[in-house]
Image (cartoon, rainbow, N blue to C red):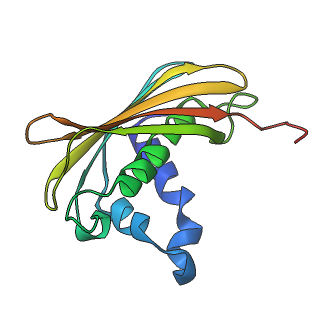
């Protein structure tokens, strides 16, 4: 899958939320402002995606900084779309199910700052995968937060 294919898949994945007012929340604003800068399939089981977005009022905590819950949500979504890049029949045909999402917060980001989110596959097997992501301030490259995201493939599962 190439960059344009990923942009189309990203847009269509959220259609049901965009049309139902009861299901709209802060990720709607994020997806509207989000730019997918790079989407590269590096091999049958390897991919990298780079996103950029501004910190807007919807993503702020009461102290005026980029909210950790928003960062975790964006990292969850951003890393999960790596699996769209490598999906094929019988191999991660859906986005899998999160087992763990560990986020470490290192630095603040303020309203109006542009952030980059860099995501890549560390390992993917038949049932389990490990993805990683980092959010960086675009102005100085400082790391704002990082994540390790473990997922399980439940397709064809008896669960």
Which quarter of the rendering shows the C terminus?
top right
Occupied quadrant, residue 117: top left
Most extreme residue toward the left is 139
Is residue 11 or residue 72 the one in the foreground? 72
Res 39 quadrant in image: top left
Q: Taking 13 as reference, is 128 left or right?
A: right
Where is residue 124 drawn, in percent x and y? 60, 21
Q: Residue at x 35, y 61 (%)?
A: 30
**Which of these two is toward me, 11 or 75?**
75
Q: Residue at x 29, y 61 (%)?
A: 33
Identify the residue at the far right of this view.
Answer: 158
Find the residue positioned furthest to the front.
63
Q: Position of residue 148 (x, y in %)?
A: 47, 31
**In which quarter of the view is residue 129 placed?**
top right
Residue 21 place in picture, x, y as percent: 52, 82
Q: Nearer the viewer, residue 51 or 72?
A: 72
Residue in the picture at 14% in, 54% down: 113
What residue sits 20% from the left and 48% below the top?
108
Q: Position of residue 128 (x, y in %)?
A: 67, 26
């Amino acid at each position: 899958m190439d960059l344009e294919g990923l942009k189309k898949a990203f847009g269509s994945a959220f259609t049901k939320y965009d049309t139902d007012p009861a299901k709209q929340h802060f990720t709607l604003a994020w997806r509207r402002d989000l730019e997918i800068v790079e989407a590269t399939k590096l091999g049958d089981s390897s991919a990298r995606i780079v996103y950029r977005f501004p910190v807007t009022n919807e993503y702020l905590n009461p102290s005026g900084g980029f909210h950790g819950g928003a960062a975790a949500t964006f990292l969850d979504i951003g890393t999960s779309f790596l699996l769209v890049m490598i999906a094929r029949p019988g191999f991660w045909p859906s986005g899998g199910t999160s087992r763990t999402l560990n986020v470490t917060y290192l630095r603040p980001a303020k309203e109006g700052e542009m952030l980059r989110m860099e995501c890549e596959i560390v390992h993917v097997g038949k049932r389990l995968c490990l993805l990683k992501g980092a959010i960086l301030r675009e102005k100085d490259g400082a790391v704002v937060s990082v994540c390790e995201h473990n997922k399980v493939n439940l397709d064809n599962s008896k669960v």
